[in-house]
Image: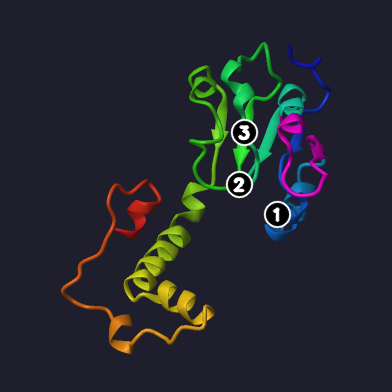
Amino acid sequence: MSAEPRARPLVYLALAPRLVAELELERELARLAPVADLERWEGPGAPDAGAVEDALRRATVLVTGWGTPHLAALREWTPETFAVRLVAHSAGTVKHLVPVEALERGLLVAHANEALAAAVAEFTLGAIILGRRLAFQAAAGLKEGRPGLPIRAQQETPARPYGWLGASGIGGRGV
């Protein structure tokens, strides 16, 4: 059963404190003060599953991101059984975070796919080019004390095509 209704909505930040600092969220979180109460995971590293499940039963909004555990308890989500009404994900896909059953029953979910799309596509293209030029093998070999790869082996060869197969919404940006 969900907790008793609150006078003000509770927003629970299920992010590692390091990630909050890295994403520079403090100023944005301060903007919530006039309209909501804020609780956050204070432990080291990412929040544990027990803390997140407790938050799902008390908070109206759960803010998630890299390192937030799978929200398995939401398989049983209904407005009557959980207080949470919105999962706001500060990263990309929520496919492996929020069970589809909760979405089918009306749980609202927001994510940062669009905000991250260009950077992810650029990184992916860069990784493909580095892979094609054998940069990863060259680095591993140098680290192990082996001689570097011949320059010719590290050059792009026009006869070798590369690209995307099965691109996601974000991956489609790089195509």
Q: Position of residue 159 (x, y in %)?
A: 16, 74
Q: Secondary structure under badge 1?
A: helix
Q: Earlier in the sequence, mark 1 or mark 2?
A: 1
Q: Position of residue 79 (x, y in %)?
A: 64, 15
Q: Secondary structure under badge 2?
A: loop
Per the model, the C-alpha gap separating discs 3 and 2 is: 10 Å
* Amino acid of disc 2: Ser
Quarter of the image containing the C terminus?
bottom left
Q: Which residue is mark 2?
A: 90
Q: Position of residue 166 (x, y in %)?
A: 29, 47
Is 45 located above or below residue 24 in the figure?
Answer: above
Front residue of 9/153: it is 153
- The single residue placed furthest to the left in the displayed view is 159
Indicate how the structure is coloured in the image.
rainbow
Q: Which residue is mark 3?
A: 87
The answer to which image quadrant residue 23 occupies is: bottom right
The answer to which image quadrant residue 43 occupies is: top right
The answer to which image quadrant residue 2 occupies is: top right
Magenta segment = 34-52
Badge nearest the viewer, 1 or 3: 1
Q: Residue at x 50, y 20 (%)?
A: 101
* Amino acid of disc 1: Leu
> For residue 119: magenta?
no
Would residue 64 appear left or right of 123 to someone viewing this image? right
Q: Residues within 10 Å of mark 3 (few under 14, many from 20)?
A: many
Q: Are marks 1 and 2 in contact (CB under 8 Å)?
A: yes
Give the label on residue 19, or none. Answer: 1
* Amino acid of disc 3: Val
